[in-house]
Amino acid sequence: MFASLSSSLSTTATTTTSLFSSTSSLSTTTHTPRASPACRSCSSFSTKRLELINKGTAFTRNERNTLGLRGLLPPAVETLERQGIRALLQFNQLPGDIEKYNFLNRLKTQNETVFYHLLINNLEQMCPIVYTPTVGKACQLFGQMFRSAEGMYFTKDDRGHIREMLDNWTNDVAIIVVTDGSRILGLGDLGANGMGIPVGKLSLYVAAGGFLPGKTLPVLIDTGTSSPKLLDDPLYLGSRHPRLPNAEYYPLWKEFLMSVRDKWPNAVVQFEDVSNDHCFDLLAEYKDKLNCFNDDIQGTGAVVAAGFMSAQGFLSFPVQEHRVLILGGGAASAGVAHQITQLIERQTGMSIDEARKLFYFVDHHGLVTEDRPGTLQQHKIPFARTDMEFDPEEHTSLTKLIEELKPTAIIGLSGQGGAFTAPILKRMGELNERPIIFSLSNPTSNSECTAEQAYIHTDGRAVFASGSPFNPVTLDDGRTLFPGQGNNMYIFPGLGFGAFLARSTITPGMVTAASAALVDITSAEDLHRGRVYPQLSEIREISAHIAAAVMEQAYVEGVSRKPRPTIPLIDHVKARMYSPGYPVYSQ
C-alpha cells in the first residue's frame, strides 16, 4: 500500500510545498488540537516520512479512489479512535516489555498518528516502554532487533561533508536529541546502539511537549566504542574502532553543531548520555552559540531540585538546615546539586555559596573533600568540603558517613543497585522523622533501593522518589503509598518547547524557572498521597505551564529572538502543541 500511496502523493511534489514545510497554515490546520484537518492537494506531499501521512483504514472512500488505494484496504473506514482501541488491545496482549517496545516501534514506522494517539492517551502505561527502563535493554539489543533506520548518523569519515549530509534530511527541524552512545543510562558505552535513546526521547518531546513529529531529528555521533563485546559482535551496526581521541572527537562535534546552526538556526539541540569527560566541555563550549542544553546535567538537576523543594511540604524545619548526601560523582550528581542550590537561592534568598555547604558528595573514592589525594574533576570542586579532612578509614564507607554526617536526605545517582541497604535505610529513619530518600539511578536494576525497601525500613515515613517507576506500596498498617518518579520528562519537554517558541538560547535562569514551575504545579493532593511530583498522566498540562514559565524567563532576561505574544503565554503554548489528527486528502 505504501508504494501506491507514495506514487499517488508525489506526482508533482517538485513544484509544490512539502507536507512537512514550516508554513504556519499547514501546522495549524493539520496539527493543532482545536482546528479541523483541512483539505490539501495530494500533489503537495513529499515522498519522505510516509509514516507521517499514512492513515491506514482511516482513508475515506473518496481518498481511496483519488489515491489509487481502492481494493488495497479492508472495506471499513475507521476513525483514529477506533484504530487506537485496536492498537491498545494488541499492545496489551504482548507478553513482555521488549515485545511491547518492538510493537510500538513498528507502529511508529507505519503510522505515527496512531502511535502518538496511543502514547498520549496511555502515557503512564507506555512511558516505561518507550523510554526508561525498557529502552536500556532495547539499546543493548539494538543490533539484533534493528529493522529500519531512524534519524542520522555521523562518523569521522564524514568530516568535511556534514553540512551537505544534513540536506539529505528534507524536513524542517525544531528539536534534535544527539548522543555519542558513550554513557547510556547506567549501562556504560553502548556505541551506536545508543541511538535508541534519542529516538525514544523524541517520542516524549512530541507526546509530552507538543513538538510536531515531522520536526524531530535523532542523531548519533559515532565516535567509536571502547567495548570489546560490541567490537566483536557481528551484528553491531556502528563504527568498529575504539573511541576517538579528543583531537578527533571535538572537531567532529563542532562540525556537526555548527552545521546544525547553519541549516536550522532555531532548532533546540539536547545533548544526551555523553560521558563525563566530554559532556561538561560540550555544554560550556556551545551553550551560548546555539539553543542547547544537556538533559543529564540540567534536566535531571531541575526535576530533582523540584522534588527536593516539594519534599519540604513534609518537613518541620527550613531548607537551610538540610544536610544532603549525594552518592555518585558524575554529571547528573553535579547537575542535581547545582540546580537545588539555584532553586534554593530563587525561593529563599540564600546565597549559592551558602547553599553549597548543605551538600556532601560521595563518589567511588569516598567523600569529596578539598584535601583528598588525587585530582578532583572540575565539576566536583564547587562542592568539595573545605571544613573536613579526608579520612580514608571513615570517609570511604557510606554507612560510617551517614553515622558521622547524620544527613536529612540521601540522593542516589551512583548506578550502584542496592547501595542503600536495609541498615542504611533504617538508620535514616532513626535520624529523621521524614527522611528524604531519592533513589534515582536507571534502569531499575541500578536503583539504589526500591520504593518498598525505603518505606518498609522507615516505617512508611520516607519521602521517596526514584528514577525508574515503582508500583504503589501497601504497608502492614493498611496505608498505600504512591512513590514519585523523578522522571526528566517533567522538565525537558516543556523546557525545550518553551525555548523553541521563544527562539532563545537556554540560560541557567530558564532551567531554574522550569524547576520552580514544577514545584508550583505539585498539588497538596499529590503530597497527601506521598508524591513529590504531580501525576504523569497530566504531563501535557505540566509541560505547557513549564514552557510558558521558560518563555517568561527568556523575555525577562532579554534573550528571546521572537517578539512576546499578545496573548497569555500559556494560551500561546497550548495553541501550538501537537495533537494527533488526520488531514483530508483531495485531488
Image (cartoon, helix red, strand yellow):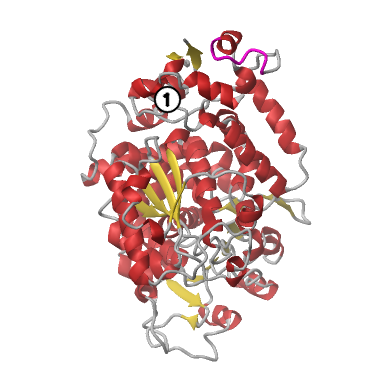
The answer to whether residue 91 is above or below residue 228 is: above
The residue where tag 1 is placed is: 19
The residue shown at (57%, 42%) is: 535
Q: Place residue 277 in its image quadrant.
A: bottom left
Point 67% across, 73% down: residue? 421
Element on which disc 1 rests: loop
Expressed as whole percent of the image width and height from the top left, the position of residue 519 reads 45, 48
Magenta part of the chain: 66-72
Q: Is residue 364 left or right of residue 353?
A: right
The answer to whether residue 68 is magenta is: yes
Query: Which residue is at 39% across, 36% downward?
Result: 170
Neighbor class of circle 1 (other Cα within 10 Å; few <14, some 14-19, many 20+) is many
Viewer-proximal residue, 54 or 432? 54
Residue 202 located within the stretch drawn in magenta: no
The N terminus, quarter of image? top right
Side (left or right) of 396 relative to 78: left
